[in-house]
Amino acid sequence: MPKTGVVGKTYHRGKLVDDADASLSIRSKAVNYGLGCFGGIRAYWNDEREELFVFRLSDHIGRLFESAKILGLEPPIGPAEAHEAVLEVLRQNDARSDQYVRPLLYVDSDELSPTLTDVPVSLSIYCQPLGKYFADESLHACVSSWRRVPDNAIPARAKPTAAYLNSALARAEARKNGFDEAIFLTESGSVSEGSAAHLFLVRRGELVSPPSTEDNLDGITRRSLIELARDALSWPVIERTISRTELYVAEEVFLCGTAAELTPVTRIDHRWIGTGRVGERTRALGACFRAAARGDDERWSSWTTPVWAG
Ligand SMILES: Cc1ncc(COP(=O)(O)O)c(C=O)c1O
């Protein structure tokens, strides 16, 4: 069996095993057809409190189970056990730095046809250290020529493994053309989201984001930012359809997501956004988000699950 070189423990089919032993057959339906769904969770190390805080763990587990429901898959364990399994993976890996956790629920069968019914389903969970997702402080994005996969073709509300071909195509095109990231439009031409992040813009002082009916993921960071903007900063937030050209005349644009956190976009399709520098609202909301996620703001303590306490 090939060794990955990564030393750690992975939850795999109900047990904690060495990373190198958490493998699937080349015949697996999960490998051949992408039959599965996954989550992406961040945990933030708080130096002062000497604690690792998992950000919105229950919400991430809840979305994973909703994704499974949408695909018609029956998870092998319940949400409470999955919650505990995530914490156990972090503990077993002695995680004391910023981490990314990936729970993956998949059709665990090596038979030929792409089926979602009457099939065994397994859950694997791994973690890895993760710092900044994007190398640069702000991005130059393009509007992709690839359209976001419609929710009624491959459910975009969920996180189905197969949908990430759509993300990868858009990202590859963006990178080959010299951009940092892609922005998807829906089939009907309105702004959907980034390749793996949601989008907000500031227009005439209001924070605007496409609703989660625009073929985008039911996003947890997006929801958190809306709550922080309204409740911590008393800003108006509007969820509405956004046209492509509104991107170009926005005062500020940023992307957000578990991996992306809050990442400013200062240029789109070669047009500077606002002043061309990171905007004030983007900075203020980013600071608010970082404090909440790292466990430094007691008002949002229900969002953070300590790994080591208790
Ligand atoms: C397609 C897509 N959109 C948006 C996001 C951001 O969602 P969340 O904030 O829930 O991580 C992600 C990342 O998980 C994603 O894969």
Image: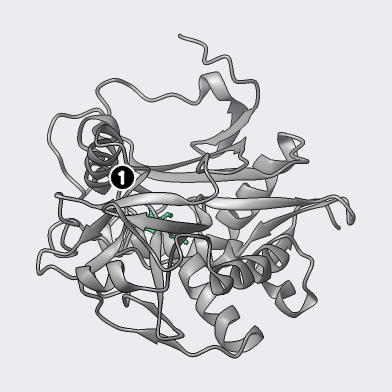
Residue underneath mark 1? 161
| Quadrant of the rendering where the N terminus is positioned | top left
Decide if residue 285 is in sight here: yes
Q: Is residue 76 visible?
A: no
Q: Is residue 203 above or below residue 116?
A: below
Depicted 223 relative to depicted 256: above or below: below
265 is higher (above) or lower (below) than 99: below
- The residue that appears at 21% across and 48% down in the rendered structure is 116
In depth, the one of 269 and 147 nearer the eye is 269
Q: Quadrant of the C terminus?
A: bottom right
- Is 308 located above or below residue 289 in the figure? above
Q: Nearer the viewer, residue 210 or 93?
A: 210
Q: Give me the residue at 59% from left, 20% from top.
A: 6
Task: Provide the secondary structure element on which disc 1 rests.
Answer: helix
Q: Position of residue 23 (x, y in %)?
A: 44, 24
- Residue drawn at x 60%, y 27% is 17
Task: Count residues near mark 1 (Cα–Cα under 10 Å), then give few for <14, some for 14-19, many for 20+.
Answer: many
